[in-house]
Image (cartoon, rainbow, N blue to C red):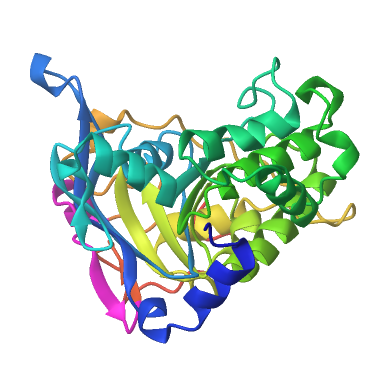
Amino acid sequence: MSVSFDEQAQMRASQPALASQAILEVEDITIAFGAGGGGGLIAVDGVSLNVHSSQTVALVGESGSGKSTLGLAVMRHYRASKGAIRFRSADIAAFDRARLKAYRRQVQMINQDPYASLSPRMRIRDIIAEPMQAHGMYSAPGERDAEIEKLAAQCGLPAGLLDRFPDALSGGQRQRVAIARALALRPELIVADEPTSALDVSVQAQILALLRGLKDQFAVSCLFISHNLAVVRQVADEVVVLLSGRVMERGSTEDLFSSPLHPYSCSLIEAIPVPDPDAPFAFNAGKARSSRRALISGCPYTDRCAFKTEICTRKVPPLEEKKPGRWAACWHAESIKLKPGQVQ
């Protein structure tokens, strides 16, 4: 007999040993495209991180920093050219077809665009039921429909919407369907790739509140990908800051927001809009970014950093533990004191 959502969440919560164990381990991952032909691009460069049970780890950074590529590698849509991704201590690169199918049941993804991620030819009930059918869940008569209706209610979807098509739903409702579909297999980990960026601000707040509640209710872990630190602050326990495929800083969410160690992290925090119509507006165009290939010999933030010195342009700074639980890849992290407006 299938285990219900509530029963599975209780089982996970009742095992403190599992809560302290890393369910996902990303160790020194490098992902390259076109490297065999010369002049290829290293999209992810030596990234390491862990996600523990019932924990949300956020990957943040500007467009092109490698966030989504790393998320797709966790789903094994991309294969790493170096390093390892382990789920429950098992290397996912070694999974055969049967083990990969089992892994896909344990790790699900929420895509960025709710308009493109749902089939327009399927009713909502069938969209949520499809992964259940693929994995042979709830074979008893009426059991699957009952579970779909229960899950829809938990995701804030009225039962009356289940027999409609996606084009009859709003953007927020479609993303709730995508979340329900991701939870339909009772996964242990969800990879959420910019799940609110295509939504209005008011709807974003509702979806973020839903994700926070479901994480606790189902004891599910999350790798949350976003460029928006205002969103990340509401959902993440730990933040990994990426730039040009490399980790610039890593630490708890509150520590990073209260005292960022890397100038790039500080610049991302300063980019958060202030909800005050009377706040002064300052636009600093700066200069165009250098190409990633031009920055491979040093820190990838040197073309914009106010604190750069000769060593920054000559040597790549290693990712080091600067304070307990705080990691940064900056030659001057211990000597500089970051203040708002100082890094622009």
Image location of residue 161, percent across then percent down: 86, 35
For image coordinates 71% across by 39% down, the residue present is: 177
Specify whether residue 244 is in view.
no
Indicate the quadrant where residue 164 lies.
top right
Q: Is residue 218 left or right of residue 88?
A: right
Residue 115 vs 199, above or below: the answer is above
**Residue displayed at 87% across by 45% down:** 158
Asked whether 258 falls inside the magenta stretch, the response is no
Pick whichever, 3 or 270, lies toward us: 3
* Quarter occupied by residue 241: bottom left
The image position of residue 56, as x and y in percent, is 50, 64
In this view of the protein, can residue 107 be seen by the observer? yes
- Report the residue that reaches farthest toward the front: 141
Residue extent of the magenta highlight: 309-325
In this picture, is 124 found above or below 10?
A: above
Left or right, 169 with reference to 36: right
Q: Residue at x 66, y 53 (%)?
A: 272
Of the pair 261 and 83, the residue shown nearer to us: 83
Rendered position, 277 above or below 336: above
User: Relative to the observer, which residue lies in front, 278 or 186?
Assistant: 186
Judge left or right: residue 284 versus residue 157. left
Q: Is residue 262 left or right of residue 222?
A: left
Residue at coordinates 34% horizontally, 65% vertically from top-left?
A: 23
- The quarter of the displayed image where residue 104 is located: top left
- In percent of width and height, residue 143 lies at 67, 48
Picture coordinates of residue 212 (x, y %)? 66, 64
User: Does the magenta segment cover residue 316?
Assistant: yes
